[in-house]
Image (spheres, rainbow, N blue to C red):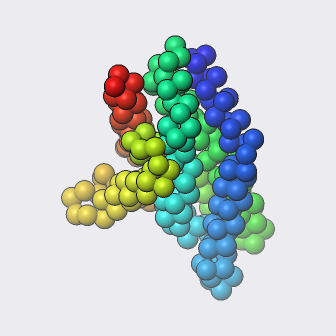
Amino acid sequence: MNNILALFKKETSSYFNSPIAYFNIIAYLAVSAGLFFWFGFFFERRQAQMTYFFRLMPWIFLFFVPAMTMRLWAEEKKMGTVEMLMTLPIKSHEVIIGKFLSSFLLIAIMVILSFPIPITLSFLGDPDGGQIIASYLGLLLMGGAYLSIGLCASTITSDQIIAFISGILMCFGMLVIGFVPYFRDFGLESHFGSITRGVVDTRDLIYYFSVIGFFLYLSVLSVESKRWR
């Protein structure tokens, strides 16, 4: 646990001691708010709802999250620090979890800072607070799933661009499989859509935790395979 906490602090510091975290947060807030208010014709529709906002999130996260995770392992390999990291008395799963949690913290901050949108809507109308809270929970779960997939993609290459593209393709595959007949229950978007209706079903929670656990496990296997080469 101490190793995970130390790695979490290290990764979090590396985020916020560089422009990466601030750029991601500002870009996310600008893009999501812009698409919601202007391109979503919010003022023309005259409805105090965030339905369109949450419909955009799977597609916005599809690019933002892999952009965050592409450096997690690829940069370690490029800088040559991964060899030093692997010689320390730290287990592979501790490194993976520490990196995942630091990235998830950044996702959570991004999501929390979008709260002025529902606050604004509360002044303009009477939005469904329960549905909005459930949708934000679904957004965090989906963000965690995207992070685990992007982190897995980052462990297989030392090139950040390849890690970024691989992360997008893997996330896209998990996203759109839900649109295929008989495979709906395997798609990220279908479970997110279920939560955004205001009902937090146990099956949706199990699905997201399973996806996160599965891809973190694959990341550990990938790191372990390189540790013993």
Quadrant in which the C terminus is drawn: top left
**Residue 15 appears in view:** yes
Asked if residue 39 lies left or right of residue 160, the reply is right
Asked if residue 90 is positioned above or below residue 218 in the image, the reply reads above
Of all residues shown, which one is farthest toward the left?
Answer: 182
For image coordinates 64% across by 52% down, the residue present is: 111
Asked if residue 8 is positioned above or below residue 153 in the image, the reply reads above
Q: Position of residue 208 (x, y in %)?
A: 42, 43
For image coordinates 50% across by 50% down, the residue present is: 160
Towards the viewer: 53 or 69: 69
Of all residues shown, which one is farthest toward the top?
Answer: 89
For image coordinates 73% across by 42% down, the residue present is: 16
For image coordinates 63% across by 72% down, the residue present is: 36
Q: Position of residue 180 (x, y in %)?
A: 26, 64
Quadrant in which the N terminus is drawn: top right
Towards the viewer: 57 or 15: 15
Q: Position of residue 203 (x, y in %)?
A: 37, 43
Of all residues shown, which one is farthest toward the right?
Answer: 123
Asked if residue 157 is positioned above or below residue 6 in the image, the reply reads below
Q: Position of residue 191 (x, y in %)?
A: 40, 53
Towards the viewer: 143 or 66: 66
